[in-house]
Image (spheres, rainbow, N blue to C red):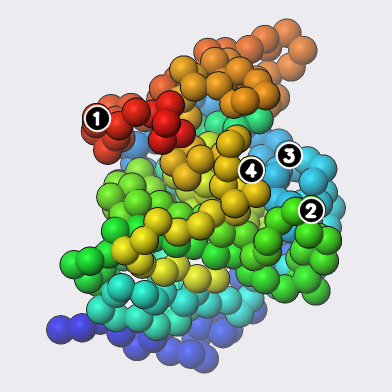
Amino acid sequence: MKLKWSDITPEATYLSRRVFIAAGAASIAGPALGLTGKSSAFSTDEKPNSFDEITNYNNFYEFGTGKTDPATYSGSLKPSPWSVKIDGMVERPGTYAVEDIAPDSALEERIYRLRCVEAWSMIIPWLGVPLSSVLKKAGPTSGAKYVAFQTLLDPDQMPAQRSSRGIDWPYREGLRLDEAMNPLTILATGLYGRVLPNQNGAPIRLVVPWKYGFKSIKSIVAITLTDKQPKTTWQMLQPREYGFYANVNPQVDHPRWSQATERRVGAGLLGGRQETLMFNGYADQVAGLYSGMDLAKFY
């Protein structure tokens, strides 16, 4: 029996829920809208960064290049109503509501390490669902090898898209299909028990904890399965500096700086730097994906 997500949630119910959710997400200073998620064995026991740190130190160039720009300017983003098109090499292509893709009842709490390619890091308590569960419902066909993701293209909502900065908008990312199906890879719709704030990629974003943060594309509107490696934004912009894989690897430096250590946001002046872990500490779960590969070549 083929599953039609559009049948799961009646449209009127969906729209009323999104309006309610948008009201909660419009301002992080307002009352918090609670979300809960099942605990996960994949979570780290490290202490999470504060909600304030997580929501006010971001890279989200659609709202500016400064770390505080996303929090300052992302109020123009309207995360409701929102849908995601899933197409390409799948048995059940379609456009699905966020609530059908990641229903509240299916959310898990995943407390993950985040490592930015700029050599800073955080610990973030995400709420989301495994990407594999979404792709299995869509039904990848036998020839599918990669998954391409695309963010919203709308300069009225994402005003920094009006200037190119060398970027060919919309922002694009991609994974190999086995990376996408790994249990660690999630689609997040919340953090710290709240609906995902705009500056963190509302209403739905990718989280791939063993890769540099730019791989975890925000505000997703399209997921396409394909048999060809998709073009990705940073690889198109500066291929010598940003590879398709972008796995956290302290042994392969960025051309302009070392990746051996990192600065934990919020650690304070005396916090110092800490050694970066291979695959950001998730080697037990993902190293096998890259067995036999030259990770200096496939960076």
Amino acid type, residue under disc 3 in the picture: Tyr
Mark 1 or mark 4: whose residue is earlier in sequence: 4
Q: Residue 95 at x, y = what percent?
A: 45, 82
Question: Alpha-carbon distance for marks 1 and 2?
Answer: 37 Å
Q: Which residue is mark 4?
A: 238
Above or below: residue 129 compared with residue 292 = below
Q: Nearer the viewer, mark 4 or mark 2?
A: 4
Category of crowding for the residue at label 2, using alpha-carbon neighbours closer than 10 angstroms: few (below 14), some (14–19), many (at least 20)? few
Q: Classify residue 50 by image quadrant.
A: top right
Image position of 72 (left or right of 259): right
Amino acid type, residue under disc 2 in the picture: Arg
Mark 3 or mark 2: whose residue is earlier in sequence: 3
Amino acid type, residue under disc 4 in the picture: Gln
Question: Alpha-carbon distance for marks 3 and 1?
Answer: 36 Å
Looking at the image, which is closer to me, 250 or 67? 250
Q: Residue 123 at x, y = what percent?
A: 55, 32
Q: Which residue is mark 2?
A: 165
Where disc 2 sits, the SS reads loop
The residue positioned 50% from the left and 71% from the top of the image is: 222
Q: Is residue 85 visible?
A: yes
The residue positioned 30% from the left and 32% from the top of the image is: 293
Q: Nearer the viewer, mark 3 or mark 2?
A: 2
Q: Which residue is mark 3?
A: 57
Image position of 233 (left or right of 14): right
The residue positioned 35% from the left and 81% from the top of the image is: 93
Question: Alpha-carbon distance for marks 3 and 4?
Answer: 23 Å
Question: Which residue sits furthest left?
Answer: 1
Q: Residue 241 at x, y = what percent?
A: 60, 35
Image position of 169 (left or right of 215): right
